[in-house]
Amino acid sequence: MSRYAEPMARLIEELKKLPGVGTKSAQRFAFHLLRSSNEDAAALADAVRALKASLRLCSICNNITDVDPCIYCSSPTRNQRLVCVVEEPTSIASVERTRGYNGVYHVLHGTLSPLHGVGPDQLRSANLLARVERGDVDEVILATSPTLEGEATASWLAAALHHISRPGHTIKVTRIATGVPAGSDIEYADEVTMARAIEGRRDF
């Protein structure tokens, strides 16, 4: 078995923690970095440090941002009373590619998953429920992925939203249509499929 010097072995182990990166890929990345110039290696290290130091969660929608509120929540041209709920920040790009949605977002940062110890308290939903309770929202689009966990999350959130609707102001809760195949992740949906899913949303 090949043995690497401690710094190389440590880098390989850290790279293996990245999603989709196995031992072989981690080794390739590590040796590429070793062959890179000091300037390139330093630029990568600086970018990682800046990522951790500068990015935060939007106080309104939980999107990852370097300014608070984020560009969607602070935009005067977007419909602030229409909120699309997604599981992760990466899902926002899928909706934006449709070029037909002009509302704002709310990011849960996960889905309900009892097997992994993720319950309602672990999801970032409190600020969304507070917005609805204040009467700041007319419609919530539930755009969680059509997986078992995504459907369970949508059902739970729909019940919570209906429960806190203000008297005289009934919140409209809709679910994206089945343009997104069941069991798939919306992060990988193309713009046409995602557009049809948004346009064909239904009451939930």
Image: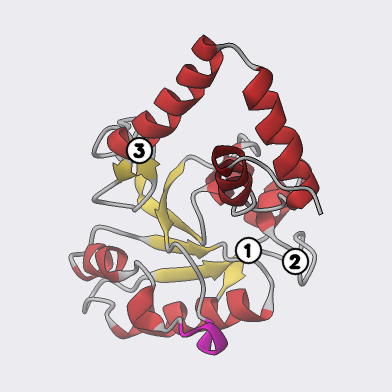
**Mark 3 or mark 1, whichever is nearer to me:** 3
Specify the amino acid type for callout 1.
Answer: Ile
Q: Which mark is residue 131?
A: none
Where does residue 46 sit, x and y in percent of width and height? 40, 24
| Position above or below: 88 against 168 | above
* Residue 46 left/right relative to 144: left
Where does residue 81 sit, x and y in percent of width and height? 34, 52
Q: Quadrant of the N terminus?
A: bottom right
Q: Quadrant of the C terminus?
A: bottom right
Residue 116 magenta: yes
| Position above or below: 150 against 180 | below
Asked whether the viewer can see residue 74, the reply is no
User: In terms of sequence position, does the residue under pointer 2 or pointer 3 come before the other?
Assistant: 3
Q: Nearer the viewer, residue 171 or 70?
A: 70
Q: Main secondary structure of the magenta part?
A: helix
**According to the image, label 2 marks what residue?**
178
**According to the image, label 1 marks what residue?**
176
Per the model, the C-alpha gap separating discs 2 and 1 is 7 Å
The residue drawn where x is 45% and y is 79% is 158
**According to the image, label 3 marks what residue?**
65
Q: Nearer the viewer, residue 158 or 3?
A: 3
Range covered by the magenta-colored residues? 113-117
Crowdedness near tag 2: few (<14), some (14–19) or many (≥20) residues, C-alpha within 10 Å? some
Q: Quadrant of residue 126?
A: bottom left
* Residue 201 left/right relative to 125: right
Residue 122 magenta: no
Provide the secondary structure element on which disc 2 rests: loop
Provide the secondary structure element on which disc 1 rests: loop
Per the model, the C-alpha gap separating discs 2 and 3 is 30 Å
Specify the amino acid type for callout 2.
Answer: Thr
Q: Quadrant of residue 96?
A: top right
